[in-house]
Amino acid sequence: MNTIEAFDFDALAAQVKPQCEALIAQYEQKRSALLPMMHLFQEHEGYVSQNAMRFAATMLELTPAIVESTVSFYTLFFRKPVGKYVLQVCRGLMCELNGAEEIMAYFRKALGIGHLETTADGLFSYEEVECLAACDRPTCMQVNLEFLYDLTPAMIDEMIAAMRGGTFNVKPMAQTVMPERTWKVAQDASVSRGGKSPGTRSATSPNNAGGVGDASGVIMLDRFITKDISFTGRSNERTVRDARSISDAAQENGASDHAGH
């Protein structure tokens, strides 16, 4: 992967650390600042780097596994570099009924790339996504999360030309590293088959985050059943303050049902 220009993550971390501290101060629990912190780093780097995740883990007193599992859950975070313009075309039902297949085919031909791929110049990344909830204006898409509606081939031509000419009305994303052909993360396939993600490779105990060593989850389940795990000490940010009370109520209801019979 080629570096576009010298990029100093330590300098970025020092620059945004006061903003991160301000974000943390807004919440009762430090970890609640994780998502806004990751958005902040993506705004500056163009993606969420391993360095950013490690920095967040240290500041928030979390394991790298917890940070990575959170980032990998949300599709708005990119764990590999992407193009300056991320083009996400909706393939939901309403858009499909209004020509999404033709629009997507036109994009693929115009850009010379497919789903989850980036052009060789690093300018465009293309993705076909599920419903974007703009069913009144199909076919729709997002460009760097900004909506565009009622797409036509002529609009696509104008859009691409404006982006290449630097006149498009949506700000390009930061780009600190030249993207590869795809931003798929190879480790995801490995993890789905029982492999370890980078954040869990140093964890040897099934009691560590991720349940490493216990693919069935039995060890973790046993901890909840046999030990007095209470969540009453957690903050008001959580709707359910005591998960055990739910299980106790369910057991009581079950016992009363059996007694009634």
Image: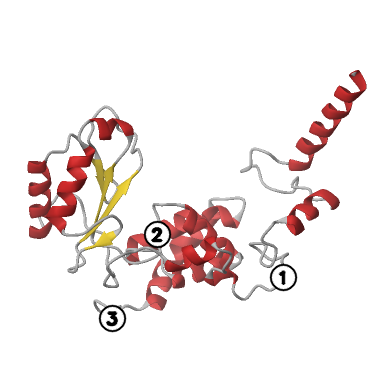
Lateral position of residue 249 relative to residue 76, left or right? right
| Discs 1/2, front | 1
> How far across and down, in percent of the image, does residue 208 sit?
69, 66
Q: Which of 62 and 102 is in front in this view?
A: 102
- For label 2, the crowd category at 10 Å Cα-Cα, with few meaning under 14, some 14 to 19 and many 20 or more, is some
Circle on res. 205: 1
Mark 1 is on which residue type?
Ser
Mark 2 or mark 3, which has the lower sequence index? 3
Q: In which quarter of the image is the N terminus?
A: bottom left
Quickly name the residue at label 2: 40
Q: Do the residues labelled 1 and 2 touch (CB within 8 Å)?
A: no
What SS does tag 2 mark? helix
Depicted 66 relative to depicted 143: above or below: below
Q: Which of 8 and 247 is in front in this view?
A: 247
What SS does tag 3 mark? loop
Mark 3 is on which residue type?
Ala
Which residue is at the far top?
260
Q: Which of 212 and 141 is in front in this view?
A: 212
- For label 3, the crowd category at 10 Å Cα-Cα, with few meaning under 14, some 14 to 19 and many 20 or more, is few
Quickly name the residue at label 3: 6
Mark 2 is on which residue type?
Leu
Residue at (21, 66) in percent of width and height: 122
Lateral position of residue 40 relative to residue 175, left or right? right
